[in-house]
Structures are given as C-alpha cells and as structure tokens.
Image: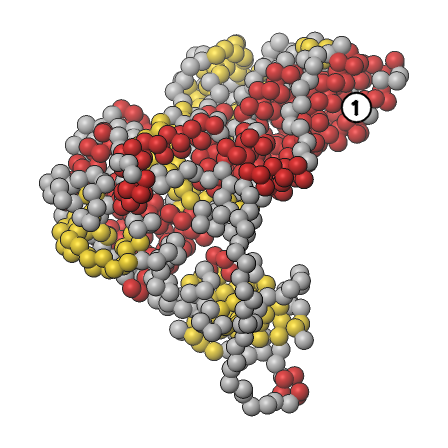
Amino acid sequence: MSIDVDEVIVWHAGSEISGTIQTATGPPVIAEGYQDNSRLSDHYSGGWIIRMKSYPTRFLTARQERTEVVTRAGLVFSIYDREGVFLLLSRRNYKMDKQKYYITTAIAYTSGKPHIGNTYEIVLADAIARYKRQEGYDVFFQTGTDEHGQKIELKAEEAGITPKEFVDNVSGEIKRIWDLMNTSYDKFIRTTDADHEKQVQKIFKKMYAKGDIYKGHYEGMYCTPCESFFTESQLVDGKCPDCGRPCVPAKEEAYFFKMSKYADRLIDYINTHPDFIQPESRKNEMMNNFLLPGLQDLCVSRTSFKWGIPVDFDPKHVVYVWLDALTNYITGIGYDCDGESSEQFNKLWPADLHLIGKDIIRFHTIYWPIFLMSLDLPLPKQVFGHPWLLQGDGKMSKSKGNVIYADELVDFFGVDAVRYFVLHEMPFENDGVITWELMVERLNSELANTLGNLVNRTISMSNKYFGGVVENKGVAEPVDEDLKAFALAVPGKVAEKMDKLRVADAMTEVFTLFKRLNKYIDETMPWALAKDEAKKDRLATVLYNLVEGITMGATLLESFMPETTERILAQLNAEKRTLEDLKTFGLYPSGNKVTEKPEILFARLDLKEVLAKVEELHPKKEEPVEEKKEENVIDIEAKPEITFDDFGKLQFQVGEIIACEEVKKSRKLLCSQVKIGSQVRQIVSGIKSHYSAEEMVGKKVMVVTNLKPAKLAGILSEGMILCAEDADGNLSLMVPEKEMPAGAEIC
C-alpha cells in the first residue's frame, strides 16, 4: 500500500525510529510517530510525524504486511507493523509520478521590443515555475509571441518589409530578452507556427458548425492598437476605453461569436469558483463592468486587412486576433479539435495558472472561458491579472519617452539584481514603480549589504580562523536554538506566500533569514570569540551555523535568483538541497571547506555615476523654446456674495479613498468609500471619464462633509469630492499639497 504524504519530520537519535501510526477516514490526517510525548520519552529517542495527503480508510491491523510511505520529495520509508507499532526498515530513493503543473504567460505582441514592464511577467512566471519544480511538481511552462493583426501589417509596411519578416525579427528579439533573463520556459510558441494556424482554422470551423459563430456586418468604432471594436457608448471621451487612443469608424462584413449564449454559465462558474480570477478586485471588475450588464456578440473576423489566419471556408476573412492568440494555450500542448489531441494535452489541460497583465484580463476571463465552453473543454484553474510596473511618473510607453529595457538594466546591475527588483518591488494588487534611483538603492542595501556582505564575511571568517574548514563542534548556546527555530520556520512561510502567488512577500521572507543571520553575527561576535583559545569550538559552531543558515537561504532563493544561488553554494562548497531538506537544520557536512577566495556577489554602485551613464544612454531631448504665452486664466460668472457666517456653515475635510467602483449602467459616476477620521462615507462623483476606479484608490482628496445626503443613480451619496475644471471641461481632484491625515480639517 502506498500513502502520499506532504512532509516527514525526523528526530535523529538512535538506530531504531518507531511508533504507532494513526489513520482515519477524513482529512486532514496527521499520523504521529508516537501516541504521546510520555511514550516517546519513556521508550524512544526518535520518531516520525507524517502529514498525509491521501490515506487508508481503516486502522492498520496488527502484524500487517510491510508498508511503503511515499513522500512528495520521492523518498520511500519502508516500515512494518508489530502489534500496532511501526518500525523503520529503510530510507531509499523512489521514483514516483509527479503532480503536473501547467503555467502560461500571455504571449507577447510582436509590435516592438519588450520593455521591463513587459519583461516582468515572464520573470514572475519563471519564479513560480521554478518554485513549483522545487516542490516536486512536473512543471510545463509555456510562453511565446502573438504575431497577427492589422497593427503588425501597418508596422511592416512602414518598415518596408513583409509582415512575416517583421514578426520574425521582433519574435527573435523577445525570445532573446526572455533567455537573457534566465527564464526556464519549456515551450516558446509563435502564432505563425503552422500547427497553431491549422488548429485555429479547425477551431473556427467547429464553432461555426456548432452555431456559436454566425455571419453578419459590423459597424462601430475600431481601435487598431487593441484590435478591438467598441460601440459609441463604450468609448471614453470618444477614445478607446482600454488604451485611451483614438478610435476610427469601421464598417465591414464579419463573423460574430454568440457571447450571450454562454454568459450565464460563465457567471455561475465564477461565483462557484472564487479562486478562478485573482486578485479579487479583478474578478469584481469583470463581473460588474462586463458580465452582469450583459455581453454583446463578439466580432471574430476581419476583411479590411490580410495579415492573419484565413477562415478556410471563407478566405476573404481572417480570424480575429484574440480568438487566434488565446487558443495558443491549448494548441501549444497538442490540442486537436477533431479528437486527436496529444498525450501531452490530455496530461496538462486544464492549465493550472494563466499569468497575464491586468490590461488584458477581460480577454482571458470572459472571451477565453467562453471559447473553451464552446469547445467543450474545462476552464483553466486560475487566471491571475498582475499589476503594472510603472516607470516613475506612469505607465511606460515609447510615446512618453520613459521606456526602460531589461537588457539595459542587466548591463548596469546584472540579471539576478534585475530579477530581484521586479519580483520584490511589485505589490500583489497595486502597480509597482521602477526608477534608476530605486534600483541602485535596493542593490546597495539589500543585495550588496544584507546578502552579499553576509556571505563574504562568513567565508572570510572561516578562512581567517579555521583555514576555510567548517566544523560543527556542538558548543551550543540559547541564541543558536533561536536561530535554528527561525530558519526552520522560513520555508513554511515562503510556501504559504507562494501558494497565494504573493511572490514579493515570499522573497521578503527569504531575506528575513539573511537579516536574522546578520543579527546572529552581531549577537555572537565571532571576532571576540577568536581572541579566546578556550572558545575556539564555540567559534567553530557559530561559523557552522552561519554557513548552514546561508545554505538554507540560498536554497529558498533559487526560484527568484537562480544564478546567485549557484554562486553562493559554489563558494560554500555546499550541495543543492530540496525543500524537504530544509526541514532539518544541520545538513551541511561538518569538515567541508569553503572557497579560499570569496567573490563579491553584488558590488555597490554610485548613484551619480549610474545616472550619468543613463544620461549618456538616453540624452534628454531639448525642447524648442516657445515664446512666453499669456497666462492661461478662466473667468467665470460670479455668484452672490455670502457672509463669513455663511461660509462657516460649510465643513471641509481631507478624505482618503479606500475603495472605488464604477456605478453600473452609468457613463459618468464612480462610487467611492472615503475614510474621514474614524468614519467611512460613501460618495458618488461624476468623474468617471477623468479617473478610473482603480487610480482613485489611495488618493487623499478635499471633501465637503456636511452636505445633506442625496441619491445619485439610486445610490446614496454622503458628501462631495471637490475638483477643479478647466475651459475644456477637464477635471482635476483637489488634493492636499503636503501629507495630511484623513479627517484633517480644511480651513
């Protein structure tokens, strides 16, 4: 009989480790290596704790045949029962089937070189994939490039080359960047791959035959960069609601997908699978803004350009780019809609995680699930819409001239430093910010000081005091036990964070271990111990604990900074460990010798020198000197004078917006939850065309707090958020110049 277990904790002691294993019929099961502590202390010096994933449905009987307990790490512990007591026979390597984990990124659009914000996604996916491999999963990690559409056709025309030549160049550059960042993808798919194009044609035909696609005419507004149609009512100030660029009128024959046919089914699925869309805010956005108001049928073909996959039964049409692109997640692993799918597809689908940017979450959580329903395929287990990485003053764009590229950063800081920054500095839900200044600060403080200096000091002291030999002399003090307990707790904390995709928080936990080891140096003062010959064994024990702790930390660091892990372990002359190994402190072989010449992991950088080089790389464009214009002013019609007493009746306070959402079926209104002192008020404002709900959260604004409550669009509003308005009707929130607490009176 085989029993899957999550972990096995061993107390090392005598040659025989034994105890009673308890089993039951309902999860979770904890089988303990002894019935109670008294039995352990009275009879045995060691034991097992086994946390089971699956388990027998009855108690094991006396004198039962030999049983194998299989760990997730692939180790087998052979035990047999003797009157209810299980005795350890052996521990050996055992090959077992691993649980699959299929992770994908959005495929990068081949319109140009990816900036660091685009690159963040592939690094994030890589960190998750690497950690899952460490956990023992059979991981398949797919990424690639999206290569069709009108935008590509136009760019190729501008460049004077064919669309295929254009996408070959850009796809190659994207792959170069992904490889530069040391990402461990298993498949790089291109939507110009022949097998993908063939399957897209078959999928389109199957959906048409099923009645999910029909032919009609489309007339509306079209956004070329987004490859999307919109109705007039969906536009924001006449511009694309997704990217803010101008839309142009378009009318053409087209095929449409009946989205409404599957809308209720998708709503039900989302409601019954709360983890399907993450974070929670993204789910709410999709439900409230798109699904609940009602889905319109989706245009899934075009005739106004040719760079796409032709509809094989109507070749003047090319397949809508999103139907083409989204199917990569199944075609890339061998899906065939005629029922001839590969073993790989049958093994891997459904995907465990689609990792995508928040700007394309609608396509992945509405269009993609509905396409899968049409194909009678199960939905992916989870879609995670990560936030953006912003460059200082906002979203990166070539038009703004604020683009930072991954290869430029690598030239300055190195691959792992860049990986550290983009992974560690990105919040779970909100946008992160990257600047050259912040990169230098983090490299100097966290990488060079906290980590690099720790490793260098430990190796240098081992060489100085013991010729590089690291031995555990067993001269322990209470501070050692505190360090060990801390170190042994970190892997569990990292696992908890990674299970929730909180990668930045997981990295923070790893660095808490390095910081604790630095504190341990301050607590034990090896330089002082070295002055007393009688304390030589204590000094050896301290250095052993440091080397062991660093080895454990380096193991946990591997998913995020794999090259750094290799460099640390090589300098320590330490073997790479499994996560299972991290449940034991003291596995570093006593008597090992560290390197004689420790290398600097991360060299400190001078900010002024870095900024000077950046200026050379990206010289500021001199803006033409404009003639001084007359100051822009606005005259408005004066209202009747009021007395000071009249003014005194109004109460103005600083409010902090802690939540905000769009008002359903309203083109203008946002509903904000505003913290004012210890109270939270609901305020409805007609500013939707000027501010998104997302960017409102966290702002501190000026609020009229004693305005009589009123209903707007059926929603109670308990105050007014103040804005300024220019001659063109553009609004700007009134915000405090200096940091002020929520509730501060404005007088």
In the rendered image of this protein, does residue 7 appear above or below residue 212? above
In which image quadrant can residue 494 be found? top right
In the rendered image of this protein, does residue 556 appear above or below residue 269? above
Q: Please give the name of the residue rendered at 20% of the width and 49% of the height, measured from the top-left corner.
A: 304
Whether residue 91 can be seen here: yes
In which image quadrant can residue 444 be found? top right
The answer to which of 52 and 197 lies nearer the viewer is 197
Residue behind mark 1: 477
Instruction: Check the image and tell me how it is coloured.
Output: secondary structure
In which image quadrant can residue 378 be found? top left
The answer to which of 719 and 177 lies nearer the viewer is 177
Q: Amino acid at mark 1?
A: Glu
Q: Please give the name of the residue rendered at 43% of the width and 75% of the height, measured from the top-left corner.
A: 712
Residue found at the very far left of the displayed protein: 313
Q: Which secondary structure lies at badge 1?
A: loop
Question: Which class describes the residues within 10 Å of circle 1: few (<14), some (14-19), or many (20+)?
Answer: few
Left or right relative to 113: residue 250: left
Left or right relative to 234: residue 32: right
Left or right relative to 379: residue 680: right
Residue 102 percent location from the top left of the image: 37, 31
Residue 498 percent location from the top left of the image: 51, 36
Residue 85 percent location from the top left of the image: 54, 17
Total numbered circles: 1
Q: In the picture, which quadrant includes the N terminus? A: top left
In the rendered image of this protein, does residue 502 appear above or below residue 79? below
Q: In the picture, which quadrant includes the C terminus? A: bottom right
Q: Please give the name of the residue rendered at 64% of the width and 28% of the height, measured from the top-left corner.
A: 602
Residue 479 percent location from the top left of the image: 77, 28
